Amino acid sequence: MVKMLKKSAAFLIFFLAFYYPIFSQKTYWASKVLEFSSERVIPFQTTEYRAIQALGKPNVLPSLNESTAAWEPSQPDSPNAEYITVGFDTLIYLHQVAIAENFGQGCIEKVLALDTEKKYHLIYQSQNNAVSSSKERGRMFNIFLPTRSDYQVIAIKLILNTEKIKGSNQIDAIGISETNEPIKSVIRVAKDAPKEVLRVNLGKGVNSRHQEFAPVISSDGKTLFYTRNYMSVFGKQKDQDVWFSVQDKDGNWIKSQNIGYPINNNDKNAVFSVSADGREILLMNKYNKDGKLSPGISRSYRTRQGWAYPEEVKIENYYNQSPNAEFAISPDGMVMVMSIQRKNTTGKRDLYVSFKKDKNAWSEPVNMGRQLNTFEHDVTPFIAADGKTLYFSTQGLPGYGDNDIFKTQRLDDTWRLWSEPENLGEAINTPNWDGYFTLPASGDYAYICSINASKKEDIFKLELPKTAKPEPVAIISGNVLSTTDKKPVECVLTMTPQNDKLKPEVKNYDPQTGAFSFVVPLKEIYDFVPYAKGYLAINESIDLSKEISYREVKKDFYLMPLEVGNKGVLNSFTFEQGESKLQAPALKDLDRIAQAMIDFPTLEILFEGHTDNQGDFQLNLKLSEERIEEVKNYLITKGVPAERITTKGWGQTRPIASNATEERRKLNRRVEFTITKK
């Protein structure tokens, strides 16, 4: 067998793989290490350079870079043979072996296949013993058998002569196939990713001679927070502060301002994330009472006087073995994704998820899994406005050079099941380090930290192609006003999706700090209920069930002061024709009225029922009385004394809309209320 393979050396073809369309044949990548001669060891090592790095798909190719996510023998240019044997989960009849040599190619001396009888078969032997000093080379090394083997392969063994290629030698992946269609290393890019994207430096309003990085854009796209790393005239790092810029009416970024105390002090300050309504920011480090910083994270709220002194964000069993970290918050404020290093980290920094437990307490971080996390640093996470799309930066997946930006989508509510990450493509990613990808709710433009022509990090704006965008959403914003004088009322505003699978959101509305803002998915109907003591909420709904593209909805909600003579219509009261049974939305309104009547023991209310004009006049009058009696009975069950509730049925005598269509008749089948005593 060995002689036959030597004579057939002409059939062994070696391929350098670039990014062609993904291959159609089934490729099986090594899944376990059976033996190895040595592996590189460095101080404080986790899995860098270890033999297990030869498992799975290629992490680097088609880029040609030295990487920690590859097996590297302990000593370069060793006089002794180095070897590694890897196993596979699937038995196949072998036609091809592909070896990802991502650095120092050409040192493979022999390749052997192990069959089910534990017998080795030589399938490749190097005929070139020349010594080379080149280190900037890598390839996908494809070895083809003349025909498929008559034995099933369970393992592949590589024997290296590291003296042949001076410097480090790295093996990133080993794959096998039953076909002779060349196995190639590909960059997984969205199918229709464009070749060119307009990339604009934000200019002197934002960027300076100093390093600008970690941009965070507000949901409405009008405020940009970022970190500026000051450099002295001698090139040494001096200070690091948070800055921000706002857009003028023409969409230009005005000259940036230092966010000032208490966010900035004499230490390293940075903002990682901003809430959907722009009223909360997440900050690097813990701000201690003595003004000094320590490892951790903090948050600050916008108040009437400015940003509040940052308070610690408490995460259960939080620790980070890396000096660096980044964090991102979901639009609803309930989920945090972080880039940190822990005991169970795959390689360097991994992505972890934590869930909000109460006002300022979060669950223990959970690793988000191998679909996302690589053996390299997986960093700068950003959760898009749809709450499903995640962007992050890594060098641990095939890309165009240094760290690239990748996009993935959440497949369930565990935040641990994700689609296979897609590279945003060569129009967005460069051969340099790319990270800190952030975009507003509209998804039209993204902001990214990248290297400028002077080899300094700046912030750029780029038009986002369709393939890179998250799912469209809507921003609902406005104020909560009094029904009497139309002045803003400080309150708690609850947004409840009518789809039970989605969770409600609660915001504190303070008119002194600006309008409220919710970022919500499309294709849903949302109920909004404000609450303030001494007022009754006027329930409103916003129907986005037919929307398919990004929208900005400006909508004010109302509270009615509990004052004698004030009147309102309970919009949630809709009755089926001829029916008096209360529907579920109406019960929620009545619960709020009951609570107000309990809070104010002398409050008395008149409820009036109305019908449309369909059917007999007297029957409609009776029906309106039955409906309003249902209201009274329900309030009594909630603890409101009967004597404080007055009812009146008007039948069809007081319409507020035409009865010409069913939609208009629904408006007439209503319940009104009037405060008669306080």
Image (tube, rainbow, N blue to C red):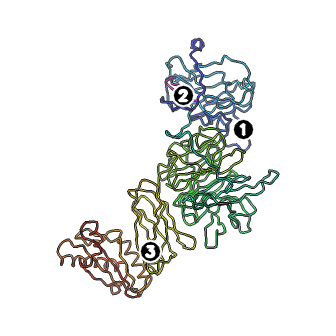
How far from the left and from the top, in percent, is residue 43?
74, 43
Tell me if residue 21 comes above or below residue 304 in the rendering: above
Which numbered disc, 3 or 2, marks the residue closer to the eye? Answer: 3
The residue that mark 1 highlights is 41
Q: Earlier in the sequence, mark 1 or mark 3?
A: 1
Q: How far apart are marks 3 and 2 (CA)?
A: 64 Å
Mark 3: few/some/many CA within 10 Å (<14, 14-19, 20+): many
391 or 370, nearer to the observer: 391
User: Within the image, what quadrant is residue 375 found in?
Assistant: top right
Assess whether mark 2 and mark 1 are in contact (beta carbons under 8 angstroms): no
Secondary element type, mark 1: loop
Q: Distance between the residues labelled 1 and 3?
A: 66 Å
Secondary element type, mark 3: strand
Give me the residue at 33% from left, 77% from top.
634
Q: Which amino acid does label 3 sit on?
A: Tyr
For the N terminus, which image quadrant?
top right
The residue that mark 3 highlights is 558
Which numbered marker is on residue 388?
none
Q: Earlier in the sequence, mark 3 or mark 2?
A: 2
Give me the residue at 53% from left, 16% from top.
146
Q: Which amino acid does label 2 sit on?
A: Ile
How far from the left and from the top, in percent, is residue 45?
70, 42
Q: Distance between the residues labelled 1 and 2?
A: 31 Å
The residue that mark 2 highlights is 183
How far from the left and from the top, in percent, is residue 538?
41, 74
